[in-house]
Image (tube, coloured by chain):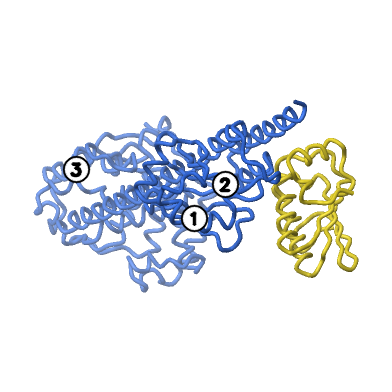
Amino acid sequence: MITENGAETAFLAADDKAVVLAGDYLNKLSGEAIERECKTKLESGVKELVVDFSQTEIINSIGISILLGVIDTAANSGAKVVFADLNEESAELFEMLGLTKHVTMA
Amino acid sequence: MIEQRTKLIHAFGALADLGQEVANKNNFQETIRTSLHLISGSLAIMRGGVARYSRYGHELNMLAVRGLGDDFPLSLSLCLEDERQFLANGLNPIETEHAKVLPFFQVYDRSFDSRRIELFVPLVIRDEIVGAVFLGEKATGEPYTSYEKEIICAMGRHIGVAISQRNLMAEIERHAEENRKLFDDLRTTYNDTVKAFAAAIDCKDKYTEGHSVRVGRYSEIIAAELDWSADQVEGAATAGYLHDVGKLTVERKIINAPYRINAKESAELNKHPAVGFEILQPIHHPYTDVPLAAKYHHERLDGRGYPDGLYDREIPYIAKVVNLADSFDAMTTDRPYKARRPAGEVIEDLRRNAGKQFAPELVTAFLRGMLKELTGETKDKRFRRMLGREYMEAEGIVPTLRNTLNEMRPTTPLTYIASDQP
């Protein structure tokens, strides 16, 4: 679905939890829309953001930068970020780059 | 070892993407935003910014920021000492913690500390500061290693080149705009000079006051009706304004003779096209055919004109335009020895002489322009202004124009064939 912020992704919201489908949309400049959408959700009271990587094969530097933005926004709101269904290769990269220090892996 | 290799592959991937982004020449703002993502994402840097340096304002203006918050300044001033030090440092990352001796880091110390800016990279390209990159802490929380600083340096060079190219483009665009304005000024000066010349020519002949100006305007109407480009229409007007410039050398008493001049006087007067050509030829006109129009505007399609008795295709086209405009003005203005003829008669004369004196398609274009004005198809009132409302709105003019145009289309040949002549 396309959200108000232009994010061509899916948000499944329930109470104070929201799920973001990353897809391979994350790896482009237009993926910034995900950050904007996360911010909107956090401002509306969401306390847990789950980023679903089940449809994501590769994550490039733009994708990582956008995820860092999501992490930063969540930290400023006191919310928790969960990375779900991450493939082994990406998990290894995240570990190496230190992203896993800031999120919960599921 | 494996971890280092994976990290290197990831960082080099970002470097390659950045090179491609800069080379693609996309939207500059997007290129800078993408560059910041790539540099942040390559080493998982939590926050940062890219600024462009204004050497006029001596300030770094932020082009893209990530995670710096609303309090971080978007414009940061540099003093001469900062500039000197950054130039000496070149494109190498500076650790902010160890550079607090510089005024720049003293002034912005609080902002850098609050957003944990660890590295500052002056983008020095060809011995010039073009911008800077600000980088915060890494997601690992560890200090930057020397190899990471080298990657940042390589990426900074790409970003610096992108900013430098953009600056050059802006400079070129500014020069082009200045040149365009200068060209417009020159063109205005040229056109004003042409009109001043036309007025000077017309002053010499008290009976045909305004003749050159009218011929210029009639030539403009014909050219516009032929769908010529704006420049060509302007060129046709200029040719009309200047067609009689050679008359400046003809004695006033011959030009103003209140009788039909004799053969000797006529020979003197008939030199004016060649003299006009001599006057206009050395001038660099924006329109190429202006001198030719002066020289050949008394030539006729049937070869009975002067000075060279040229036939149809030998006559420059612009001269045919001016010839028609000139003849029309001669017929529609009072002369000392001859009153002007009614519009209907003039139209008939043009039709009769199409293919003999005048190029038929030019006559058609001119009459069409006149009809458009009289029927209100165009808002121009040039004919009425030049010839008077009463003259142009005489009864029967519009039907005469329509009939003439209908007759000319099927019957009159488009061009006169010189070889058909005796």
Q: Give the residue type that dot 2 points to.
A: Glu
State whether residue B358 appears in this view: no
The disc at residue B118 is: 2
User: Mark 2 and mark 1: span between their CA atoms?
Assistant: 11 Å
Assign the C terminus of chain B to one quadrant of the image.
top left
Image location of residue B371, percent across then percent down: 47, 62
Which chain does the residue under circle 3 lie in? B
Q: Closest to the observer: B20 or A66?
A: A66
Does label 1 lie on the same chain as label 2? yes
State whether residue B361 appears in this view: yes
Q: Closest to the observer: B281 or B66?
A: B66
Mark closest to the chain's N terminus, 1 or 3? 1
Q: Give the residue type that dot 1 points to.
A: Asp
SS label for mark 3: loop
Mark closest to the chain's N terminus, 2 or 3? 2
Up the image or down, B376 lies above or below B179; here it is below
Which label sits in the foreground, 2 or 3? 2
Which label sits in the foreground, 1 or 3? 1
| Identity of the residue drawn at 44% across and 41% down | B168
Residue B312: quadrant of the picture: top left
Image location of residue B386, percent across then percent down: 32, 65
SS label for mark 1: helix
Shade representing chain A: yellow
Up the image or down, B266 lies above or below B346; here it is above
User: Mark 2 and mark 3: span between their CA atoms?
Assistant: 87 Å
The disc at residue B109 is: 1
SS label for mark 2: loop
The disc at residue B270 is: 3
